[in-house]
Amino acid sequence: MSGTFLGMPSLPVFGIGNLHEHEPFPKAARRELGNPQLRANLGHATRTIRDKRLAVVSELPDWEELREAGRAIKESVMARLPELLEEFEANFTARGGTIHWARDAGEANRIVAALIRDQGATEVVKVKSMATQEIGLNEYLEEQGIAAFETDLAELIVQLDHDKPSHILVPAIHKNRSQVRDIFLREMEGVDPELTNEPARLAAAARAHLRRKFLSAKVAVSGANFALADSGTLAVVESEGNGRMCLTLPETLITVMGVEKLLPGWEDLEVFMQLLPRSSTGERMNPYTSLWTGVTADDGPQNVHLVLLDNGRSAALADEMGRSALHCIRCSACMNVCPVYERTGGHAYGSTYPGPIGAILSPLLTGITAEENNSLPYASSLCGACYDACPVKINIPDILVHLRGEDVDSKRDKRGKRGRERLPSQMDLGMKAASWALSSGKNLGLVEKALPLGRLAAGPDRKITKLPGIAAGWTQSRDIPAPPGQTFRQWWDKEHQAPAAGPGAGAAPAAGTEAPGPKENP
Amino acid sequence: MNARADILDRIRSALRDAPAVPEVPRDYRRASELGEEELIELLTDRLLDYKANVFVEEAAAVPQRLAVLLEGTGRYAVPHGLDQALFAEADAHDAGSGRRVTDGPGHRLSVDELDGIDAVVTGSAVAVAETGTIILDAGPDQGRRVISLVPDRHICIVSAGDITAILPEALRRLDGTRPQTWISGPSATSDIELERVEGVHGPRTLDVVIVRG
Ligand code: SF4
């Protein structure tokens, strides 16, 4: 059943978990920018993937048609989400799978831990999943005495080093080969002490390290890239084969997936499986994709579970301007083209979801009033590169601007509640002043007379590094040069006075400082 | 309220503006007109790009090709539905040494058994030339997913008639509810400094035999 919503509108319920900044973006960014290794690796990575993506995207004559189809499919999924979820549930269940619903991170973690305990298992193998990272599953399982082994090479590196991923596609991109070797030598049991830093040797060491785990694991935990409502089918897209190992070998498979990952049916997969690999790794197709529909007798796990996760997604859906952020297929193309991300890296965003998409998705999931995330919508120059790269055409710049507006409004409301009468904010006053100054040339001329004051503020190095009040936000991430000694209009006046006023002055008629108007015309 | 009702309720409430359900424009390519030779050439090119080994053979020459590929290999697994005649040449070389292990309803190879096997030979359901993708759907000539995963070398037979040009054509020939594995080259990673390394957990060698006619 779908139908219109007739009940009482409920207030949006936001998500919890690894969705928060631990400190404001500007502060985190300043620290990360001080790490030259990170900047060099990231610069190299984003440039390389960007070029590969461009090459394989330009091969397809119908790329724009695919993007448009992708966008429309996702938009229709969001509009029909309740009925599609019910359809998916019916099909998945009919095929022998079990569905669990989780309102938030805590509930999802408890469900997964209970399912693992039901099997009497104390360890699980995991295939890279952003949803489980979002809910902090590994940490929770550890508290419960269950060891979760990440099996994706990059995730393994990050996990062994007790670090956090910095990129959703290549999570260990902030480490170079020698650092990886050192981590393996330090943390991997029984590793060859002669291990070199050759990537092929390092990959072989990871293969040997995980092989026994795969072959003996009773329970695996995965995410899912897509779920097809009309059949109950799930899909995982990967490269290394660790996904296939997790999805095929253990008796029990537990998948955690956000409710927004649905597609209506089989026909839609052809669109997304053309969009995703090319946008993501810049390959024509990723090495392995696995599809499974509930339980297949004799083939793969016989005990199959899916945890459907809300954790703030319904709240994001309630934001009419922001809901298309849920269309994201986590390809990471927007990160690789983002000039801010290229320099700060993923850690500065705090949340599981970094880069341009993270800057909108995290505050949408947690609510913009969550202090930690309200600086994220400002982590962008609004250049629009992310929008052009996005395979499902999410208009990230528009949503950023919308969320900035929400942020300003929410702060004003907070102040309004405190004082008896709402005091105009600095922003309001600034806007008023600007509107007065720009309304006539005479007013602007008056303002310009104050310019030398700015030169004074700049000091001998002719840079202003701190502006007062709300303008401080501007100088938090940049210096501004001292204003020039005279304005363009003052210079023009001087240059265009009567010839006697100065050498080199042409025969131009004198111009007043008034804005162009009828009376000026000779 | 239980979580299910709660979540569905929240979602319905979020959608109380009743957003329109857009028409999905499907004017991307859905069919193509490449001939068999062009398809073979394109698929070969893509697979080589992924560092797979490719052999294009007439049907009659396949047993000989398999015998050569399996030379020097220890035991190898085959699914019960794969035509046993394909191994006539290999068997002749072996003089009945019994290197071939069949996985089928009567005898399911355990994971540990598979771990001790060097290679697997399977058929395939359909292939996509443009992306260099071979799709297995666990049909009788392909077997359970696990047998093409654990051995370190996968020899995969693709009939020319099963090659399509683009993904939408391939998916139209498949039943989405069968367990599927889409394979585009041997397993690979670019996780260390973006340097591509072929062969991580999946088979490190992929040999593709394309059969003409
Ligand atoms: S927002 Fe678009 S470009 Fe960015 S990760 Fe999501 S799908 Fe990819």
Image: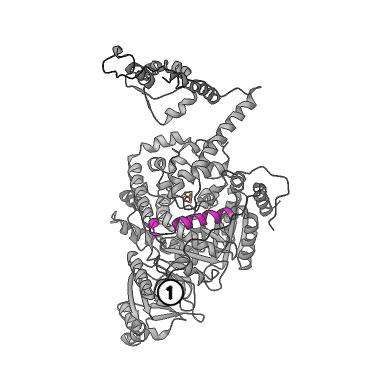
Locate residue A319, reporting x and y percent: 60, 43
Q: Is residue A517 magenta?
A: no
Q: Quadrant of residue A365?
A: top right
Residue A163 visible in this rendered orientation of the protein: no
Colouring of the image: one colour
Q: Amino acid at mark 1?
A: Glu
Q: Nearer the viewer, residue A230 or A16?
A: A230
Q: In the picture provided, is B94 more to the left or to the right than B104?
A: left
Locate residue A370, reporting x and y percent: 56, 37
Q: Is residue A301 placed above or below B2 in the rendered structure?
A: below
Q: In the picture provided, is A266 more to the left or to the right than B151?
A: right
Q: Is residue B105 placed above or below A370 in the rendered structure?
A: below
Instruction: Residue at 62% x, 60% y: name it.
Output: A99
Chain of the residue where label 1 is placed in the rendered structure:
B
Quarter containing the N terminus of chain A: bottom right
Q: Which residue is mark 1?
A: B113
Quarter containing the C terminus of chain A: top left
How many marks the image carries: the answer is 1
Instruction: Residue at 45% x, 43% y: name it.
Output: A384
Range of magenta residues: A56-75
Which is the main secondary structure of the residues drawn in magenta?
helix
Q: Is residue A67 magenta?
A: yes
Locate residue B123, reporting x and y percent: 43, 77
Q: Residues within 10 Å of mark 1 (few under 14, many from 20)?
A: few
Q: Secondary structure at mark 1?
A: helix
